[in-house]
Amino acid sequence: MTSIAVVGPGAVGSTVAAWLVQDERLDVVVCTRSPRQGLRVDSPSGMLEVDPPVLTDPAAAKPVDWVLFAVKAYDTDAASAWLEGLVGPSTRVAVLQNGVEQVARLLPYLPLEQIVPVVVDIPAERLPDGVVRQGKPGTLIVPSGPDGDEFVDLFAGSPIDLSVTADFVTTAWTKLCLNSAGAVCAALRQPSGIAHQEPVAELIRGVVAETVLVGRAEGAILSDDLPDIVVDRMRQNPPLFLNSLVADRLAGRRTEVEARNGAVVRGGRARGIPTPMNAMLTVLVGAAAVEGFPES
């Protein structure tokens, strides 16, 4: 039996944990700061109600075969306490986080060869009653190789679409091109329908164009028409669709703008590429809910 620890049962962490628990080949434990009674995921296949073991004290953790590290990017340092107990010499740590810096975030705590970055696209949100709503099965993409193949096999019993890629850099930066556009909606506190306004669409194209330039400098193969593709995708969403940056901002929660647009700014600075639009959005969205200055 393969042992798995899911660190961070937020929307994505709860979703993957609930599906993995269904597989009798897997022994799943959930690691979190606060006690909880089971997981409930309203999936496209129906309600999943599972009650895996829950750990709240990192000192009680024991080595497992796989760690699925699904905390928000800004919680990485705080959640790293779990890794000391969960990670043994043969443990692989799959990083289910936004952005393109998954490996860099974990390198202070783990050897490179034990880190498996994952591009995550699982539409899921936590509702006020604690239920996680999974909008559609979603996808997980990992680098090709033995570790990638084993990670894919973990989800053989779930409807989530798993795949490997020989060009993870391109895959990750393509996703970041889509994610970076979301900061425009977050800054405006508006759903995706705002992209139908051409001045806003042009702003989105500019943000994505900067992301494309930095991604190419990092080795990604990105097409010239990506800015238009991103705008078209946003216009195809339901008009009231809220990306996670908008949802977090409206709820007064901290956002992951640093992991998204901030990554573009850091990459541009390292490569000598100006990224003024991403820099502005990183500051505006990041400062929007500063403690002590709640939004009206």
Image (cartoon, rainbow, N blue to C red):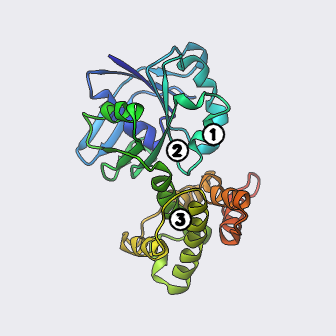
Q: Which residue is mark 2?
A: 97
Q: Amino acid at mark 1?
A: Arg
Q: Quadrant of the image for the N terminus? A: top left
Mark 3 vs mark 1: give the one in front: 1
Using the rendered view, name the quadrant where residue 235 is placed.
Answer: bottom left
Mark number for residue 105? 1
Q: Who's the residue at 53% across and 17% down the image?
A: 89
Label 3 vs 2, first from the N-terminus: 2
Q: Are marks 1 and 2 in contact (CB under 8 Å)?
A: yes
Regarding residue 126, the answer to whether it shows in the image is: no
Q: Who's the residue at 55% across and 51% down the image?
A: 99
Q: Name the foreground residue: 161 vs 257.
A: 161
Q: Name the foreground residue: 86 vs 54.
A: 86
137 relative to 67 in the view: left or right: left
The image position of residue 37, as x and y in percent, is 42, 27
Mark number for residue 182? 3
Q: CA distance from mark 1 to mark 2?
A: 10 Å
Label 3 vs 1, first from the N-terminus: 1
Q: Secondary structure at mark 2?
A: loop
Q: CA distance from mark 3 to mark 2?
A: 16 Å
